[in-house]
């Protein structure tokens, strides 16, 4: 029997698997298909890398971008795992060498683009002993997904041509509609409860903040001060337009901050150069459109700023997930203005497909609701992905400075009861109409004016009920089924409220939307969250020593510094201060290959540092 824990420890330096990882690995190695949803930094890659090492043959990993493949292969090779990329950017000699190594059984994983795979599916790939296919960034296959790629839609042929080869599809963000589409498009033999694995989307190391109503000049000033307080910490500023990325990068450069723009309008060699500089910590900040991010596997990004409102929560979650992938503390800031809503709405309305326009507008409204919320922001994100969270996170701006709340259980029960009595077939607007006793055509046509809950909420005007309904949605007591005419349905958490088993706190709407100057200044002071760092001066000095050593090694090996060790591993080294190779190898995240390669060097450096500190004291 294969010991997956031995593989995990030997190559990756961990003693335990995370949630669902072992279940996925066991199903895949038994020949079953899988759909895996895990947040960025949640361990998706191990779900196919461990099976690739355990199974006979070669695993084919389909990835959308060459740069992303390069990052992942570098990380695997650094752990002593035989892997390669196979793409059209390689020379004929390089491609030949990859084919030779595959046919000889030397490679356990090959990373390919969908185009390359499909173009040689009947030639090269048909002659390989295949262990399985892994479809990374699987949301790209769905038109409901946030990064739809036309070339991904042809991957259904894999099961037709290789019926005996299992497929694992992986993504960090996919709502119910996108998940169903992925399963259908890839012809996956899975169903809810069997083959579909959804891990917690919670990223507790990320701090979440929203800043509303800032002008461009105030945003620019805030960003400069934010970055200056985090010297050397890599980060990304996401902008809505190409022009904004260039203007902001020039602005930061004037203040002595190393920053470069990144967008689809630049030449390929310019984009590639910017990405390489950022990966190697030679530029601190990238000002980018959404064209940047999927193609980078950089684990030490410490912050993400959204200059504008993203178009959906999926997009937002995917982008903030690029920070803190190593598990160390990271920060996210979102700027929000109604002008962003106008611009994004116009972009969506320019589409041709009516059904897709409707869904995209609904997703944009959910993003707007997140930005305007008075509810714990992490709860909103988790509940959006159907992960019910009954508790606040205490790591977002709302939790740090909560609004005044009151017992709103009665109002919540009225709303939930109205939804249930419509048999979960009514929209949010109709639910409010029922409560306020509206005589609308929808109410009369469906006979909702005969419901017991009709008119029971006349004490509040419609806009108040709309606000309460939004809060219940954000707290996970109801959900909106976009694929069923935006119908409101009650979640298991909501049923607890209906049955009297849970109390609900609601925040009453402000009577004035425009804050006073004093109020605005007060919130500005609250937005800035100090970056977490050690209080020990000695540990700070040791951290810098190890960072420098890591950078020297990375340059000598022509790889990014985080490929040598992540920031999280450096933190553990500083915490435990191993002075022997044996102690060094006990640090989580350090496998046998890295222990043998770097152990003596780092242990010697730590021992020398500690001896110097003792002499100095």
Image (tube, grey):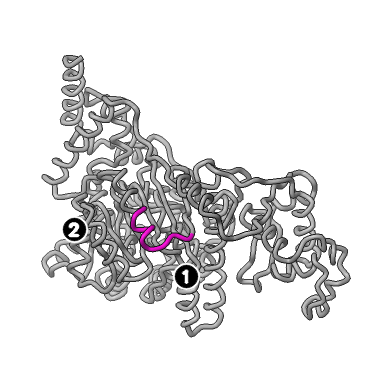
Q: Does residue 33 appear in the picture of this structure?
A: no
In this view, 42 is above or below 511: above
Q: CA distance from mark 1 to mark 2?
A: 55 Å
Q: In this figure, which residue is indicated by the disc labeled 2?
A: 101
Image coordinates of residue 406 in percent, x first then y, are 71, 46
Residue at the image position 69 percent from the left and 63 percent from the top:
466
Task: Give the quarter of the image for residue 242.
Answer: bottom left
Q: Nearer the viewer, residue 7 or 292?
A: 292
Q: Which residues are magenta?
A: 213-222
Classify the position of the C terminus by image quarter.
top left
Q: Secondary structure at mark 1?
A: helix
Task: Give the quarter of the image for residue 536.
Answer: top left
Residue 219 in the magenta stretch? The answer is yes
In this rendering, would 437 be left or right of 149? right
Which mark, by number, is residue 140?
none
In this view, 397 is above or below 313: above
Q: Nearer the viewer, residue 226 or 237?
A: 226
Q: In this figure, which residue is indicated by the disc labeled 1?
A: 339
In this rendering, would 426 be left or right of 569? right
Image coordinates of residue 469 in percent, x first then y, are 69, 60
Instruction: Report the predominant secondary structure element of the magenta stretch.
Output: helix
Q: Secondary structure at mark 2?
A: helix
Q: Does residue 561 appear in the picture of this structure?
A: yes
Residue 502 in the magenta stretch? The answer is no
Residue at the image position 39 percent from the left and 41 percent from the top:
329
In this view, 565 is above or below 316: above
């Amino acid at each position: 029997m294969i010991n997956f824990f031995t593989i995990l420890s030997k190559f990756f330096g961990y003693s335990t698997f995370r949630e669902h990882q072992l279940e996925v690995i066991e199903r895949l190695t038994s020949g079953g298909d899988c759909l895996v949803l895990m947040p960025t930094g949640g361990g998706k890659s191990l779900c196919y890398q461990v099976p690739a090492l355990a199974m006979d043959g070669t695993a084919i990993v389909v990835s959308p971008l060459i740069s992303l493949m390069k990052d992942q292969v570098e990380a695997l090779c650094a752990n002593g795992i035989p892997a390669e990329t196979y793409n059209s950017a390689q020379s004929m000699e390089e491609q030949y060498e990859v084919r030779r190594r595959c046919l000889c059984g030397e490679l356990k994983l090959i990373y390919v683009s969908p185009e390359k795979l499909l173009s040689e599916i009947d030639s090269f790939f048909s002659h390989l002993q295949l262990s399985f296919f892994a479809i990374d960034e699987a949301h790209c296959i769905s038109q409901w997904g946030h990064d739809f790629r036309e070339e991904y839609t042809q991957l259904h042929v894999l099961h037709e041509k290789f019926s005996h080869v299992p497929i694992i599809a992986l993504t960090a963000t996919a709502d119910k509609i996108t998940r169903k589409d992925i399963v259908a498009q890839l012809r996956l033999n899975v169903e809810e409860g069997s083959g579909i694995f959804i891990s917690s989307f919670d990223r507790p190391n990320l701090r979440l903040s929203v800043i509303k109503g800032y002008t461009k000049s105030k945003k620019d000033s805030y960003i400069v001060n934010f970055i200056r307080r985090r010297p050397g910490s890599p980060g990304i500023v996401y902008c809505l337009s190409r022009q904004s990325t260039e203007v902001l990068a020039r602005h930061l450069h004037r203040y002595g901050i190393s920053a470069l723009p990144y967008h689809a309008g630049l030449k390929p060699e310019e984009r590639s150069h910017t990405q390489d500089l950022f990966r190697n910590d030679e530029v601190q900040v990238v000002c980018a459109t959404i064209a940047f991010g999927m193609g980078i596997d950089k684990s030490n990004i410490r912050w993400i700023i959204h200059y504008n409102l993203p178009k959906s929560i999926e997009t937002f979650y995917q982008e903030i997930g690029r920070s803190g992938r190593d598990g160390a503390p990271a920060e996210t800031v979102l700027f929000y203005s109604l002008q962003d809503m106008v611009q994004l709405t116009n972009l969506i309305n320019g589409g041709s497909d009516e059904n897709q326009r409707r869904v995209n507008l609904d997703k944009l409204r959910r993003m707007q609701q997140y930005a305007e919320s008075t509810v714990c922001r992490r709860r909103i994100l988790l509940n959006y992905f159907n992960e019910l969270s009954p508790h606040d996170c205490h790591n977002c701006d709302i939790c740090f400075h909560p609004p005044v709340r009151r017992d709103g259980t009665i109002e919540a029960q009225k709303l939930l009861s109205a939804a249930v009595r419509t048999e979960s077939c009514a929209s949010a607007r109709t639910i409010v109409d029922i409560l306020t006793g509206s005589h609308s055509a929808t109410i009369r046509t469906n006979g909702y004016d005969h419901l017991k809950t009709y008119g029971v909420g006349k004490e509040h005007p419609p806009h108040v009920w709309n606000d309460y309904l939004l809060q219940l949605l954000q707290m996970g007591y109801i959900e909106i089924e976009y694929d069923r005419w935006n119908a409101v349905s009650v979640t298991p958490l909501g049923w607890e409220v209906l049955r009297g088993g849970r109390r609900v706190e609601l925040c009453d709407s402000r009577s004035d939307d425009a804050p006073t100057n004093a109020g605005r200044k007060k919130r500005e002071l609250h937005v800035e969250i100090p970056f977490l760092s050690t209080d020990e001066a000695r540990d700070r000095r040791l951290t810098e020593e190890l960072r420098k050593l890591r950078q020297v090694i990375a340059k000598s090996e022509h790889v990014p510094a985080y490929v040598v060790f992540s920031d999280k591993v450096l933190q553990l080294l500083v915490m435990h201060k191993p002075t022997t190779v044996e102690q060094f190898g006990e640090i989580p995240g350090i496998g046998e290959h890295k222990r043998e390669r770097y152990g003596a060097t780092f242990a010697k450096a730590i021992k020398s540092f500690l001896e110097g500190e003792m002499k100095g004291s």
